[in-house]
Image (cartoon, rainbow, N blue to C red):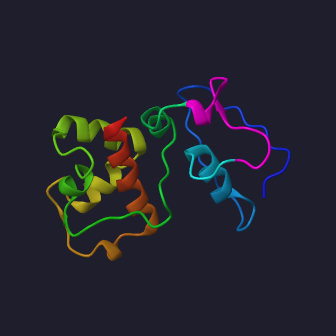
Amino acid sequence: MLRDLSLTIPFGDHLVITGASGIGKSTLAALLAGIHEPTAGSVAFAGRPAATLPEGVRNRLVVLVPQEAYVFPGTVRDNLRYLAPRADDDAISHAADRVGLTPLLARLGGLDATVADPGALSSGERQLLALARLALEL
């Protein structure tokens, strides 16, 4: 349960929610994403109640990356293009740079490297791949 929370995130900024277990990170994320509605108070974007935003608009404003991000066996390129199948290598490189994935790409052997066992990647590495996927969409 969240109490007395007021949060302002300037347009264009990014927010990462971290903290100890049980403090409301998932609740806050679910409220921002529209998965849950507040029992008191409100969630607004640019002063507009979140419930009045078209789903597509809200989905572009709030992106959730789960702790266990999905990565499948295949090439790094295929994993990154999962949500944007028409993305070219320039777009992929730009997205990788935006989220800090470039060093991991180099270590893995580039976009054509095969991810045979996604479990061999750390949780953080899988999250970076998922963030780059989302950056291709933004």
**Vertical position of residue 103 compared to residue 62: above or below:** below
Region of the chain picked out in magenta, as a range? 38-52
Write the residue at 72% across / 47% down: 38
Q: Point out residue 1 in the picture as x, y percentages from the top left corner.
A: 78, 58
Q: Point out residue 125 in the picture as x, y percentages from the top left corner.
A: 40, 61
Give the side of residue 31 with respect to residue 1, left or right.
left
Q: Quadrant of residue 21?
A: bottom right
**Vertical position of residue 24 compared to residue 3: above or below:** below
Write the residue at 48% across / 45% down: 63
Towards the viewer: 51 or 109: 51
Write the residue at 49% across / 60% down: 66
Q: Point out residue 49 in the picture as x, y percentages from the top left corner.
A: 65, 30
Q: Number of marks in the image?
A: 0
**Vertical position of residue 66 compared to residue 85: above or below:** below
Give the side of residue 8 with respect to residue 33, left or right.
right
Question: Where does the C terminus fall, quadrant-wise?
Answer: top left
Q: Point out residue 134 in the picture as x, y percentages from the top left corner.
A: 37, 45
Please say whether residue 110 is visible from this viewpoint. no
**Vertical position of residue 21 compared to residue 93: above or below:** below
**The stretch drawn in magenta includes residue 5:** no
**The stretch drawn in magenta includes residue 39:** yes
Give the side of residue 27 with respect to residue 88, left or right.
right
Towards the viewer: 51 or 70: 51
Please say whether residue 68 is visible from this viewpoint. yes
Towards the viewer: 92 or 27: 27
Write the residue at 53% across / 27% down: 12
